[in-house]
Image: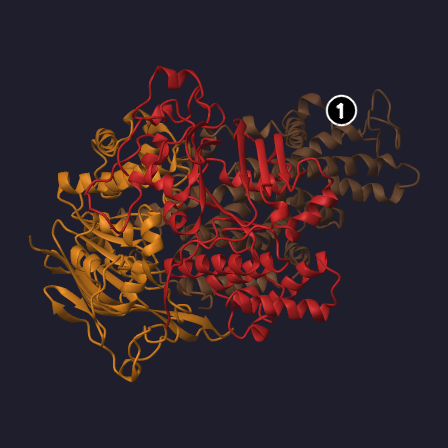
Chain colours: A orange, B red, C brown
């Protein structure tokens, strides 16, 4: 399997606040600060982190909904960092997106048929669109006879299927899934995750999967990148990450995810992080996690740890990286 | 920072005089909402009890009636939206559904407090003022004393430099700190029952862990009972002593937390546990799933509400609604086939 | 972490393409028709009253030549006659039938307000949506112009503009429109900014839609319903403004049977013949009330959440 997407040292900052007259930003949010990763064809790569870590901004940079401030993005061997206009619209055929909110992402004043056909029409493939829409709806488990209905007539899970059908319309190579199940009820969640897995098997899709929920990530991903305050702090294959996370932040994140088993919860050794994520306006110097880390030493405050290979393809940026299981149980 | 170990559930010693008498007893509660397409039977004959100092979790998906149940207990169903149409809510023997509005206001906040998913604070008033106002509404306190108590409770819920931060406005607090402030406001009057409606759903997972630990800590020090309303079976496992599962406006199963997770007797509970994503256990590529979607509560299916989605449903299930059966120690399930059947291992 | 306001949300890279003229109105309005708006509107009794009032006035305007018992300009009665069977609303100083004048006045008052409203809405939707959608320098410049115009009291400014021309209903309409559109444009721009940030617009961009398509197909259909509500509510205000300016002698000139002008003619005989002010005043009130009730009803019905 070849490399499909390569993101190299991308940076994105947002200006914050401004004077009344001169539109001069008073500060900048360091939303994404030197993020690099690659995704191979046919795999699922997850970006995980809490709100404000920059995972969604990274997704928007890959989708070219936002322009990078620095860095470079390559897709299928071609640089796409600065594509615009017609060339950018062509790129949309290959990179599609599934949204978090199945209500907000569907235009309430359009029928399902029009919503799913939207990418086809936008790309000038109006001919045969109706037939294709029926196929797509069937593919995601919806009744094609319901194509004339409006989104509000469907349940949350069904609406998410409509969004998935829309994303499939152009037969893309890469689909960016931005928290695709976090707005859904538990029973709907499993249905949609299974659908995403089936589609990947059938169509050979590649996913960039954005999520805050490590238990969801564990079910669908091949490789995982963990983000904290605009940087990737750890990248690993799924088994490596859940078997023995190296970065203290990843460990804390894993440890905070509840396990639906009272016996495990009682015996579990838990790390409860103190304090909250610092403001991305003024991220801490050197290691960004040092203000909340229990392993912190002087070096963490002075020297930025590199995202280095520790073993196999397992990378972590910590001066004191040591493996810890996702669910550690008292002996 | 700190490494802690989750404690085994603390046992609260119950005063001998009140032993055996539940703190709250809900009997056959029925609540309806009005909607353009008809009457929604949001809560349809739900009964349960909470003992003093106990943690009961109500679990279910959106639209199962769990929030409507909580709002009904406190008489908080907005008049234009719907109303409680039947049943009793006995709080220490007093029916909250038939007391006068003034009496209900006294109980609300003072004896029973509630926290919501979205931190609901007045954006234009100082945090400290908002907490002291709650205190002064129920206690004869001077402004000064109320403020001091507010600061004390902010400290208790882990707000650093509480005396200083009490002067802040809500927007100066992060989401997690706002939820802490709300907990301070809710427990400042030392209520006997705290109703927490999805208290961590809007929060990040590391903050969620902090808030859950805080709630248990506060409960330990003040000895109140908690009614936790959530959709997350993961949170319940480490938090509650007893669990009640709701589906389609009804209680489908109720059990001590351990037996619910070990031997779920209702196919819905079993399916819910099966399709919950988890960090441990064997990774399965495909999750077991419950097909279909929850029923409409405007014209719910006759018979068992879960029958249309249930893999084990038979004629009987579609014809008559199953009564709650005793299937184990304090373990009840509303399924015709709950006794003896094993739906599979969880 | 403190809350952070992100500003200057960078415009889409696709936005370099210029937005062409607004076309395809039928596509934009189509979803409105499909959702049973009228049926739901009729469920609310205040909206029903508003609707009936507006329909009656429109019918009066359209059918004025058939309904009117007399020519509006004909001097065929005694002066200052009180209401009677032959002159239901009485006659004015020159013996003209007041009822007929009010019927024909409906044409002028409603018509002027309607065309002014149309002009205003078009200008506002065009300017507001283009500036809101494109953002950047165009937006800043246009919005500063708008702010400047908004800084003057609009009625006063309309009087000044109307004073530049020979007084007539046409010049009055243009004067009102030229002043009134700015407030609307600001509102439309705000609506566009809000809709632009909604996720389905991002979805349309991901689909590869051109900016013009996104604006027409996705943003405008979600902006127009509130604009229609606003335009309906504002019809009442416009009718009042037109009457007021005509009353001041800036609009319709005698003997034109415009309601405001009729009020003006009647004011000198208020004590001897109060019906000269009463009936035109009632007509104005009925129109304003009708449009306000209808607008309120539309607001409730057109809300997508309903």
When the figure is inspected, residue A2 is found, relative to residue C257, above or below; the finding is: below
Instruction: Tell me residue C291's x, y (percent).
Output: 65, 37
Q: Residue furthest right?
A: C272
Decide which of C219, C102 is in the foreground and name it.
C219
Mark 1 lies on a secondary structure that is loop
Q: Quadrant of the N terminus of chain C?
A: bottom left
Chain identity of mark 1: C
Instruction: Tell me residue C230's x, y (percent).
Output: 58, 44
Quadrant in the picture for residue A145? top left
Horizontally, is B141 left or right of B228 in the view? right
Decide which of C34, B293 is in the foreground and name it.
B293
User: What crowding class fits label 1: few (fewer than 14 Cα within 10 Å), some (14-19), or many (20 or more)?
Assistant: many
Determine if residue B85 is in view: no
Q: How many marks?
A: 1
Instruction: Tell me residue B23's x, y (percent).
Output: 60, 44
When the figure is inspected, residue B235 is found, relative to residue B274, above or below; the finding is: below
Image point (42%, 23%), residue name: B304
Q: Which residue is mark 1?
A: C70
Quadrant in the picture for residue C134? bottom left
Quadrant in the picture for residue A194? top left
């Amino acid at each position: 399997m070849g490399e499909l997407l390569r993101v190299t040292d991308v940076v994105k900052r947002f200006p914050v606040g401004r004077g009344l007259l001169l539109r001069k930003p008073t500060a900048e949010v360091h939303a994404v600060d030197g993020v690099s990763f690659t995704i191979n064809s046919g795999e699922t790569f997850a970006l995980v982190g809490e709100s404000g870590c920059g995972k969604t901004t990274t997704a928007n940079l890959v989708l070219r909904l936002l322009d990078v401030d620095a860095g470079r993005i390559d897709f299928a061997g071609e640089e796409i960092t600065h594509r615009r206009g017609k060339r950018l619209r062509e790129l949309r055929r290959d990179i599609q997106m599934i949204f978090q909110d199945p209500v907000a992402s569907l235009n309430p004043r359009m029928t399902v048929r029009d919503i799913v056909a939207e990418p086809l029409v936008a790309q000038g493939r109006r001919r045969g669109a109706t037939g294709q829409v029926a196929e797509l709806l069937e593919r995601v488990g919806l009744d094609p006879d319901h194509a004339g209905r409006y989104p509000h007539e469907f349940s949350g899970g069904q609406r998410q299927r409509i969004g998935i059908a829309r994303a499939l319309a152009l037969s893309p190579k890469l689909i960016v899934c931005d928290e695709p199940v976090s707005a859904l009820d538990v029973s709907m969640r499993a249905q949609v995750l299974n659908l995403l897995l089936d589609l990947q098997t059938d169509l050979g899709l590649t996913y960039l999967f954005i999520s805050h929920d490590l238990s969801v990530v564990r079910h669908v991903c091949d490789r995982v990148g963990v983000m904290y305050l605009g940087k990737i702090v750890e990248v690993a294959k799924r088994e490596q990450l859940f078997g023995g996370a190296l970065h203290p932040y990843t460990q804390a994140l894993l440890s905070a995810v509840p396990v639906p088993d009272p016996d495990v919860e009682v015996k579990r050794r838990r790390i409860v992080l103190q304090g909250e994520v610092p403001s991305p306006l003024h991220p801490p110097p050197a290691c960004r996690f040092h203000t909340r880390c229990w392993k912190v030493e002087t070096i963490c405050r002075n020297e930025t740890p590199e995202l280095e290979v520790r073993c196999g393809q397992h990378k972590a940026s910590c001066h004191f990286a040591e493996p810890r299981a996702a669910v550690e149980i008292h002996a | 920072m700190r490494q802690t170990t989750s404690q085994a559930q603390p046992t609260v010693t119950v005063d001998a005089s009140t032993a055996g008498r539940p703190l709250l007893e809900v009997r056959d509660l029925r609540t309806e909402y009005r909607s353009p397409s008809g009457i929604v039977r949001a809560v349809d004959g739900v009964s349960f009890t909470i003992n003093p100092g106990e943690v009961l979790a109500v679990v279910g998906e959106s639209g199962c009636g769990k929030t409507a149940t909580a709002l009904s207990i406190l008489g908080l169903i907005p008049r234009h939206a719907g109303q409680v149409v039947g049943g009793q809510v006995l709080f220490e023997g007093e029916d909250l559904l038939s007391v006068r509005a003034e009496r209900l206001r006294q109980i609300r906040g003072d004896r029973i407090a509630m926290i919501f998913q979205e931190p609901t604070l007045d954006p234009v008033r100082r945090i400290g003022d908002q907490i002291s106002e709650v205190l002064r509404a129920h206690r004869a306190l001077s402004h000064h004393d109320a403020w001091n108590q507010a600061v004390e409770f902010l400290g208790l819920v882990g707000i650093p430099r509480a005396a200083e931060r009490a002067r802040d406005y809500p927007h100066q607090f992060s989401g997690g700190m706002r939820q802490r402030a709300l907990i301070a406001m809710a427990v400042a009057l030392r209520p006997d029952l705290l109703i927490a409606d999805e208290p961590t759903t809007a929060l990040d997972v590391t903050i969620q862990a902090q808030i859950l630990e805080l709630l248990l800590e506060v409960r330990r020090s003040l000895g109140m009972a908690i009614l936790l309303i959530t959709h997350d079976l993961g949170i319940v496992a480490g938090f509650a002593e007893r669990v009640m599962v709701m589906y389609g406006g009804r209680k489908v199963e109720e059990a001590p937390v351990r037996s619910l997770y070990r031997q779920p007797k209702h196919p819905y509970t079993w399916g819910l546990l099966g399709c919950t994503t988890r960090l441990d256990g064997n990774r399965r590529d495909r999750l077991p799933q419950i097909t279909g979607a929850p029923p409409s509560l405007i014209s719910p299916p006759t018979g068992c509400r879960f029958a249309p989605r249930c893999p084990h449903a038979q004629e009987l299930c579609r014809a008559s609604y199953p009564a709650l059966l005793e299937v184990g120690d304090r373990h009840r399930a509303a399924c015709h086939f709950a006794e003896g059947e094993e739906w599979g291992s969880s | 972490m403190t809350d952070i306001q992100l500003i200057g949300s960078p415009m889409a890279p696709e936005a370099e393409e210029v937005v062409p003229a607004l076309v395809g109105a039928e596509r934009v309005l189509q979803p409105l028709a499909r959702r049973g708006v009228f049926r739901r509107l009729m469920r609310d009794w205040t909206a029903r009253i508003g609707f009936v009032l507006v329909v009656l006035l429109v019918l009066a305007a359209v059918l004025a030549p058939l309904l009117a018992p007399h020519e509006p300009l004909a001097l065929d009665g005694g002066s200052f006659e009180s209401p009677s069977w032959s002159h239901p609303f009485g006659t004015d100083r020159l013996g003209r039938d007041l009822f007929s004048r009010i019927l024909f006045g409906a044409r002028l008052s409603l018509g002027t307000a309607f065309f002014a409203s149309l002009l205003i809405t078009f200008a506002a939707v065009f300017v507001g949506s283009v500036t809101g959608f494109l953002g950047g320098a165009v937006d800043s410049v246009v919005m500063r112009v708008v702010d400047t115009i908004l800084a003057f009291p609009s009625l006063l400014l309309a009087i000044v503009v109307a004073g530049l021309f020979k007084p007539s209903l046409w010049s009055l309409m243009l004067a009102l429109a030229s002043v009134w559109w700015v407030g609307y444009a600001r509102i439309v721009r705000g609506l566009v900014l809000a809709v632009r940030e909604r996720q389905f617009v991002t979805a349309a961009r991901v689909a590869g839609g051109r900016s013009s398509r996104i604006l027409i197909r996705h943003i405008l259909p979600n902006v127009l319903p509130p604009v229609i509500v606003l335009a309906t509510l504002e019809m009442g205000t416009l009718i009042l403004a037109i009457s007021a300016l005509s009353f001041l002698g800036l609009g319709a000139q005698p003997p034109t049977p415009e309601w405001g002008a009729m009020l003006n003619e009647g004011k000198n005989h208020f004590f001897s013949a109060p019906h000269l002010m009463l009936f035109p005043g009632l007509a104005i009130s009925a129109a304003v009330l009708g449009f306000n009730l209808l607008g309120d009803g539309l607001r409730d019905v057109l809300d997508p959440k309903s």
